[in-house]
Image (cartoon, grey):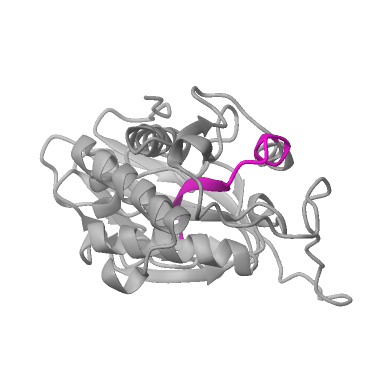
Amino acid sequence: MTILPIAFAALTVAFPREGADLGSVRKCYVIGAVDGGETNVTVNGKAAYVYRTGAWAAMVDVAEGTNEIRAVAGTNTAIRTFLSLPPPERKGPPPEYPKLPYALDDAQEPPTNRAPGEITVYVDAGHGGHDTGAISPHGWFEKDANLLVAKATATALSALGYNAVLTRESDFFIPLEDRPKAAHESRAAAFVSIHHNAPGHSQDAVKSRYVSVYAWNAIGEALASSVSARLEKAADGEPPGKGVLHANFKVTRSPQVPSCLVEVDFVTSPAGEEAIWNPLRIARTGKAIAAGIDDWCRGRNLEKVK
């Protein structure tokens, strides 16, 4: 597992990164970790929330221009600077979100009448390589958590008899448009992208935590609904579920192959961080996603799952 370099042995700031441009924000969440049993952390003079693992989180006020964050724990101090820009000018209509260029316009038939051994499902571990994704209070990367859950999902699908294919099996980068391409070329039954969430910069990292599944169109929503039902059942309220949401993610913009994007938890949340790297929880999540895909492939009544 990759860990970011730290400035102090006892106190780290994981987000924001040094010199980051956070866009136009007037509040910002800050996360990091402290060791040695320290429970008193202040950020810019105000007490931070410290979790049992040593992960801490705070909200700070932000001014336009260069900002400095000063975190203090005992005799240790960590400092980060970042930029906040003026609000952007709004010009013209909102952007359009076209379908993937290689996708056909007509939706595939669901694989309801086919045996699992005849069905191929692509499981995509989001981010990878230089694209780390979100970062946890202890400096662990989303890309690594995504791969762990993707592998658990593929293993569970294989145990159910499906032909599960991972878009990546190690830490390397794949451009967004290339991720679903192999699924289209092989006429796969479904494409599921695995991610872990992070809140907007001005949202509270402690309070922002839920599981959700995103889709772009009706065929994706049907798949997402099945996966969401199983995930929420497995989570049992920890974290709570938000169900199926609409999003214009590039990996889901397919009129042809049913596609969805799963946000398993919030990697930035101190409690979420602890849960995400728990091996038992990883296996349970993979089995839940696989069960949701299996429900969709078999056309099961979702009301019986809840």
Q: Is residue 89 above or below residue 19?
A: below
Which quadrant: the C terminus?
bottom left
Residue 46 drawn at (x, y percent): 29, 63
Which quarter of the figure has residue 220?
Answer: bottom right
Farthest residue, direction right: 92
**Is 239 placed left or right of 96 in the picture?**
left
Q: Is residue 148 above or below residue 43?
A: above
Q: Is residue 295 above or below residue 5?
A: below
**Is 154 placed left or right of 99 in the picture?**
left
Residue 51 drawn at (x, y percent): 19, 52
Q: Nearer the viewer, residue 221 or 299?
A: 299
Which quarter of the figure has residue 276?
Answer: top left
In this view of the protein, can residue 267 be seen by the observer?
Answer: no
Residue 177 drawn at (x, y percent): 73, 42
Q: Is residue 263 magenta?
A: no
Q: Nearer the viewer, residue 133 or 21?
A: 133
> Which residue is painted at 81% across and 60% down in the image?
98
Count of picture labels:
0
> Which residue is painted at 66% across and 51% down in the image?
257
Q: Is residue 184 magenta?
A: yes
Q: Nearer the viewer, residue 39 or 77?
A: 39
Which quadrant: the N terminus?
top left
Farthest residue, direction front: 113
Q: Nearer the viewer, residue 118 or 191?
A: 118
Residue 250 drawn at (x, y percent): 69, 52
Which residues, given as a range, are shown in magenta? 182-199
Q: Is residue 73 above or below residue 299?
A: above
Which quarter of the figure has residue 37?
Answer: top left
**Is 224 placed left or right of 300 in the picture?**
right
In this view of the protein, can residue 195 be seen by the observer?
Answer: yes
